[in-house]
Image (spheres, helix red, strand yellow):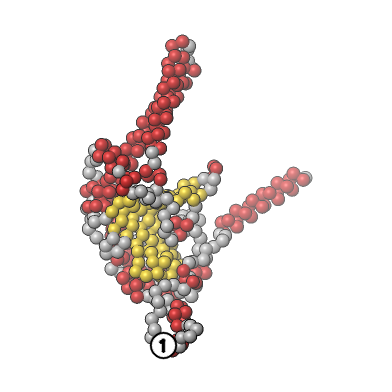
Amino acid sequence: MQFDARPLSEPVDRQTARVFASTLRERFPFARRGTLSIAGIVIPVVMFIFSLPLLAIGIGALILNPPPMGLIFTLMSVAMIAGGVLILVKRGDSAADQYRLDRFAAANGMRFHPGYDDPQLPGVLFTVGRDRQSSQLVRGEEPRFVEFGNFRYTTGSGKSEQTHRWGYIAVRLDAPLPNIVLDAEGNNGLFGSNLPVRLDKRQRLSLEGEFDQYFSLYCPQGYETDALYLFTPDIMQRFMNRAAQLDVEIVDDWLFFYSGSPLSTLDADRWRWEFSVVGAMLDKIDRWSRWRDERLRIASTSPVSGVQPALADAPLLRPPEGVAEPGRRLKRRRFTWFVVVLIAIVVVNVVASAVIAGS
């Protein structure tokens, strides 16, 4: 993979960035609404309009009456004007960042896209929460499709509402594979995995060597042999050396790398590392295209009405591409010990409060 990081740090003229931003809607008609919204212009204009009468009232009050009312109105108007200016400046910076990423993508034989609302990707990261949005996408087509991007989603409501931000790399595979997750040990938190879902522990498979110190591997029950076929010692070594801080998922015909921080940035060193991760894997995962799910052999050779069942006894018949139903998705845990303990604490407190109130 070629690598030219110069566009990430080259100065960008404000006018050039504005012209680039104005062409986004035409270039990307199906891009996410947040990227191409005119709110970044409308809101500052509204703030300016409302700040003018406040400023006039504040100045008049300062002339006719002593503080504090005149001072309060003046400060409110100044704050609104400053807020509008800040939004415009931030919008300009965002357009400049997108322009740099667009030039960076072109310099490296790739393409830029501002992102999508609710991107239709099958990984666990893209199936949780609401208001899901991808952004700052950099895509390559050769030697296979690769997409670098950022992702956000929202959980909770009211005071407990929280926005989660991730980075991801998506690599298109040649054929569907069983759903396998490598939960990186190096990015886990106090309560275990940082992944947005909890997987059934009965699906965990221990591999040889030091691999278990870097990753917890989960595969559908009954697919342990298939996982060993896919994760040969040389491939495991690549993951340990290059992607030890990234969670990994194989699902359908995709390979995903997940990061708890953005991966599409203006940081040249980060891009250099990301390119090295993908480059290290591309020449190793080609053999994955030869994998076939033996469970589909029976389905592909079952007798059909009016057809001779001679093929049913052909031992060398190669199964078709695809994954049988049990291997398509990992099972998730409904509860964690943390939740159980938390519920127990709440119940104890409620009972104790009732006893105290009754006495």
Q: Indicate the quadrant where residue 287 lies.
A: bottom left
User: In front here: 236 or 72?
Assistant: 72
Residue 305: x %, y % from top left: 50, 84
Q: Check disc 1 and give the amino acid type.
A: Ala
Residue occupying image coordinates x 41% and y 88%: 314
Does residue 280 show up? no
Helix, strand, or loop for circle 1?
loop
User: In front here: 199 or 152?
Assistant: 152
The N terminus - image quarter: bottom left
Residue occupying image coordinates x 37% and y 43%: 36
How many tags in the picture? 1
Other-residue count near label 1 (Cα within 10 Å), few / some / many at <14 / 14–19 / ≥20: few
Residue occupying image coordinates x 40% and y 37%: 39
Residue occupying image coordinates x 41% and y 26%: 49
Residue 133: x %, y % from top left: 42, 50
Q: Indicate the quadrant where residue 37 lies.
A: top left
Does residue 344 show up? yes
Residue 59: x %, y % from top left: 42, 16
Residue 12: x %, y % from top left: 24, 40
Q: Is residue 14 left or right of residue 36?
A: left
Question: Where does label 1 land, which residue?
Answer: 314
Q: Is residue 135 left or right of residue 223?
A: left
Q: Is residue 145 left or right of residue 349?
A: left
